[in-house]
Image: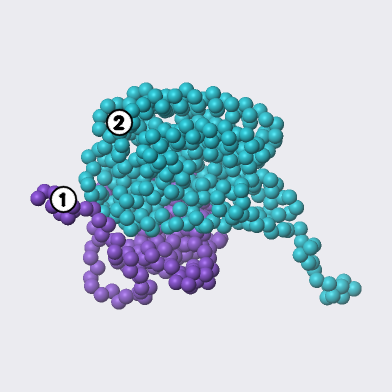
Chain colours: A purple, B cyan
Amino acid sequence: MADEQKPGGSAAPLPPGGEAAGQPAKPSPPKPAAPPPKPLATMAATPWESNLARDLKERFGGQIAETSTYLGQNFIVASPEAAVPILEYLKLEADFDYLVDITAVDWPKRPERFDLVYIVYSFPRNERVRIKTHIPDGYKPETAVGVHLTANWLEREVFDMFGIEFAGHPDMRRILMPDEWQGYPLRKDYSILQQDQRWVQENLGIESGQ
Amino acid sequence: MKAASNATMPDSTFLDSTELVLNMGPQHPSTHGVLRVILKLDGERIMGTDCVIGYLHRGVEKIAENRTYTQFNPYVDRMDYVASVSNGLGYCLAVEKLLNMEAPPRAQVVRVILTELNRIASHLVWLGTHALDIGAITPVFYCFREREEALNIFEKYCGARLTTHAFRIGGLQYETYDGFEQDVKAFCDMFPPKVDEYEELLTGNRIWKGRLTNVGVLTADECKEYGVTGPMLRAAGVKWDLRKAQPYSGYEKYEFEIPIRQNGDTFDRYIVRMQEMRQAVRIIQQAVANIPEGPIMGKVPKVIKPPVGEAYVSIEAPKGELGYYVVSDGSTQPYRVRVRPPSFVNLQALDRMVRGGLVADIVAVIGTLDIVLGEVDR
């Protein structure tokens, strides 16, 4: 009996999204926000108390919504137009001279759809800070290339994957996907099986486009 | 008269232009994969470059969002496939951070041994191919001979040589095999004389020096500006290594030096990497001398469901800072996995390094960047 139960009864850790992801996602135009959006679960972050956090709050005031710590990692939530001035301030006044990464996270249910995340590191202080801003779809954040040259390719990748265009960027082209590709792969409404069928048909000669 | 001549003759034809656009790659033996560089040349001088990448783009970050934490683990090996163990370590550490746990001490030590062996293997691939690009054929055979020994240890440990999937979230899947310590010790005894051998072939070699010295210079400030890390940053005189700066997996317990050089040219990067291999042997020797007893797997739930949150964890991969930014929404699948690849970021500095140099230098510079296109494109 125990043998019988074993194969069927055990709750195998199946990927719940496996099937759902298989359906081709419809490129849905902005829906009339139907049901009241569910409050997203938030992470259990604690306030970040330090001289730097205090300085930043003093300098940028209301533009900084939150300075927090989670798992020992500090982050700032700032308004989108403050991101580059904060990067500049951190670089010039606080020795955060190395821009580690720029990336984005898509939260389609939120009105400000994207999290734009900057990670900076300071060699002299041996300290890492994340700067997060919430931006709606279509918002064009200012480029950080003027502050850190490395932002060039990193922002191009964000544009390529999420369709976030950076204002003032010297070379705003796709970087990993082909230039003519339609759609932004890392958006949540882009299915994992989705292709730009026309591009595939025209350039690879595959009739099904898959 | 002047106006008349202007009206009949075009200002210039393409034959009068001093600028030549030359396409290099994507299929080119010295681009180490599928990298395409569009070169603007004035004679032999490089006026500018444009990198075309993405030929190997597989959407690893998208795949991550559609797999469970455990299922995604093997995929990371396919990014930097010559340093797959490092990739796996970074990912496991990031998820462990989200779970707020640490691997047991025994697992940590075995992880260090395998990661450092992999660093040696990765540097050997770099050295062999770099020398081959420059025109020295012998080193590649020497390097792959020794790399084989390291890969054999991986194979005996977990069955795979290249894309090892050696680590699991929370520790290790496999106990070390009988004779693991002896094999590793034998490698450590065998290897340093081999490094001497490579150095004998190359370090004092006039051609080698001539091709490498003052080629592709990147100063410390430029490195920071471009986000360049790893041996390239250290060759420019910045004593920075994540294993020392923000130790992980018990690296604080080992004694080793961070080799640095001052000029930031291709030759200095060569020296730094050679010394790094020696330091890696030192770390392995210390680690293998006292592998603690105990479990190899921490207490990890069957279904990994980290609480809502996010973490950025980075390690010192052979090529530089390899970071994983993982966002959890409390489900069994990562909400977002961002890989901060050292190769991608370092490659951006290519233009700065070759501008004004000769066409032949670009081969040396691509070699010294030590890029793996699987990681650039992900």
Q: How many marks?
A: 2
Q: Nearer the viewer, residue B180 or B357?
A: B180
Residue A6's disc is 1
Q: What chain letter is assigned to the residue under label 2? A: B
Task: Specify whether B82 is left or right of B287.
Answer: right
Please tell me in which quadrant of the rendered image residue B103 appears: top left
Q: Residue at x 32, y 64 (%)?
A: A21
* Label 1: few (<14), some (14–19) or many (≥20) C-alpha neighbours in 10 Å: few
Relative to A101, is B271 above or below?
above
Q: Nearer the viewer, residue B307 or A80?
A: B307
Task: Specify whether B162 is left or right of B220.
Answer: left
Of circles 2 and 1, the one toward us is: 1
Q: Which residue is mark 2?
A: B106
Q: Residue at x 40, y 61 (%)?
A: A186
Q: What chain letter is assigned to the residue under label 1? A: A
The amino acid pointed to by label 1 is Lys
Residue B216 position in % (x across, y down): 63, 43
The amino acid pointed to by label 2 is Arg
